[in-house]
Image (cartoon, rainbow, N blue to C red):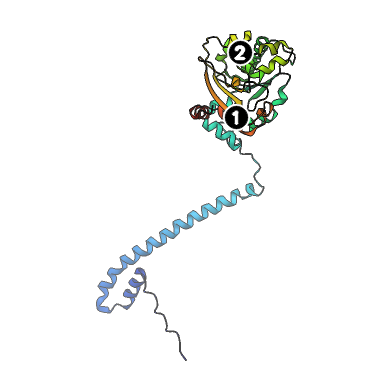
Amino acid sequence: MSSWPEKAPPPPGPALRAVIGLVSAPAGGSASALSAVPRLLRSAGGTIIGHAVGAAKEVSSLTAHVALYPAGVLAERRELHDPRHRIDTLSPLTRGLILDDIAASGTPIVLVHGIVDNRAAFAFLRRTLRRRGFGRITTVNYSPLTSDIRVAAQHLARHVERVCSQTGYEQVFLVGHSLGGIIARYYVQRLGGDVRVPSLISLGSPHAGTHTARLLPLKVARQLRPGSGLMRELAEPTECRTRFVAIYSDADEVVLPHRSASLEHPDLMVTRVRIHGVGHLSLLVDREVVHTVADALTERMAAELAAIGLD
């Protein structure tokens, strides 16, 4: 029958070796044994002091724990709210826009609808802009019976002033669909609105007129015909600081010819974006278009659009 070999006991520590040496020392070696006493006291003393300090800290921690315990019985209900420089309460897209372009994220956006339409036409575009992080969005309703683009532009000017007064911002972005883009352009180009508007985005707006306007017996339609007095006025030399983004489609059934919506003027800063296969009204709900609008409102993305040259 086999048995496991017995393990040798661990070697004694320094203090224990000193004690063993002291006990087992022969009578003649009393001097050397006594010399080990100071080493024993120093080793034992250091160990005792270390344990004493650790015990004192543990007692202090236990005392504090007992004193604070009642305060932690109930679940914490205090909200972590600090309104100073907070962005963690915002959506990821809003935070991203603020970090990427803080000016664009706060600048109000004014939407201008087309002929015989109203602000409801911008429901999808407005929702998309909010999801992309733009917070201040307003629409201006002008009368569907508007007979003069110049009068409508003056109405837009008053609306922009109200928006600036209410928000404290000195500038706004303008986005206009169809006739709304022409009204917005007249405001910034002929009424001094370029001071208030750093960027204007037009969607399917007949900047050089459209032949379909000949089918409508309205004064405002006569102003939208190619070669009309208003079109000649907009084609005159100008000093306008507004940056234009003209989005137009090669399938627009209202603006004919399609190139009329591309806005060609030697004195204007224009980025032209051609969209393929999207109808006139569909420009307001097409995903590619609405995201292009959002991109065009930020300085970095607008620069990329201009560099790509999507015309």
Residue 195: x %, y % from top left: 55, 14
Residue 45, by quadrant, is bottom left
User: Which amino acid does the dot numbered 1 rest on?
Assistant: Ile
Residue at 59%, 28% (x, y): give it: 293
The residue at the far bottom in this view is: 1
Depth check: 202 or 38 in front?
A: 202
Q: Which residue is mark 2?
A: 187
Vertical side of 184 occupied by 16: above or below: below
In the rendered structure, the answer to whether residue 290 lies left or right of residue 271 reads: right
Element assignment for label 1: strand
Callout count? 2
Residue 52: x %, y % from top left: 45, 58
User: Which amino acid does the dot numbered 2 rest on?
Assistant: Tyr
Q: Is residue 126 visible?
A: no
Residue 104, by quadrant, is top right
Depth check: 66 or 153 in front?
A: 153
Q: Which residue is mark 1?
A: 275
Disc 2: CA contacts within 10 A as few (<14), some (14-19) or many (>=20): many
Vertical side of 41 occupied by 146: above or below: above
Mark closest to the chain's N terminus, 1 or 2: 2
Residue 273: x %, y % from top left: 56, 27
